[in-house]
Image (spheres, grey):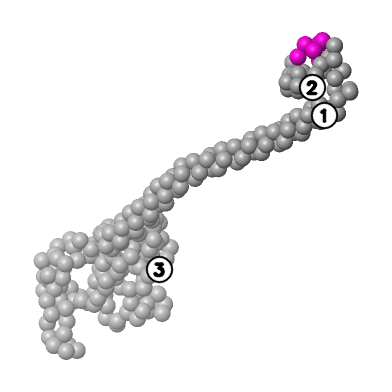
Amino acid sequence: MKMPCYLVQDLLPLYHDGVCGEQTAADVREHLDGCENCRAALGGMDADTGAETQLQAEKAQASAAALHKVRSDLRRKRVLPALLVGLAAVVVLAAAVLGFRKYAMGVQLTIPTEDIAAVTLEEDNSLRVTMQDGKCWTGLTASYRTLRTGGEEKEIVLFTLYVDLWSSLFQDGWSDGEEAMLFNDLLDGTEAVCYVRWDEWEQVNAATKTEGEGAAARDIIDGDAVPGLLHTMWQR
């Protein structure tokens, strides 16, 4: 039985998708062989299917791009706070280190007598001090004085050393093996060089009185007032 066009066109979607029965499909094919209009309608379905497939592919690509953008945004949102936290931590640490360094460089520590390796008078008449291995200093004060003990006097060089806390921790200063100059030309008549600990320096200064005026002025230490505070490091 030859099928009319309206019935074939109703069946074309099922025929196109391959879901109609065998006999129905055979009847539709028979009709299509002799009907140009229905063949054109079937061809239009093929074109629509291609366009729909392309549209679906484009939608899939757009969805994938949107998903990628969302993931990238989420990664940036996670990474940026982490970077800011890390940067803040670095800044805080640097500030803490600089703050501690400033504080530590202002803390002056006493250097024990035994940390001094030697005080030497060189051939050029310069007076120099050298530290023991692993020891260092950052501050030095030295002056000529007269030591008066039990009515006897002798001309001495009095000096003290200190090291700031930062340098003591990181060995950042004059250290072992490095000679430092006390005087570049030791005065004739100097009989000894005495070391005073930094924490006892003011006590020795308090026991020092100036006698005379002008070029004849002398700083005289009352040795009886500071027993055991002056440590002889060199003498003629």
Q: Which residue is mark 3?
A: 179
**Is the C-beta separation of discs 1 and 2 under 8 Å?**
yes
Question: Which residue type does callout 3 highlight?
Answer: Glu
Residue 205 picture location, percent across and down: 15, 70
Question: Which residue type does callout 1 highlight?
Answer: Asn
Alpha carbons under labels 3 and 2: distance apart: 117 Å
Above or below, 197 against 144 in this view is: above
Front label number (3 vs 2)? 2
Residue 42 picture location, percent across and down: 79, 27
Is the C terminus in the top left, top right, bottom left or bottom right quadrant?
bottom left
Residue 5 is labelled as: 2
Residue range (magenta): 20-25
Per the image, label 3 sits on a secondary structure element best described as strand
Q: Earlier in the sequence, mark 1 or mark 2?
A: 2
Q: Does 44 sit left or right of 179 as displayed? A: right
Seen at 52% across and 40% down, the residue is 70
Question: Which residue type does callout 2 highlight?
Answer: Cys
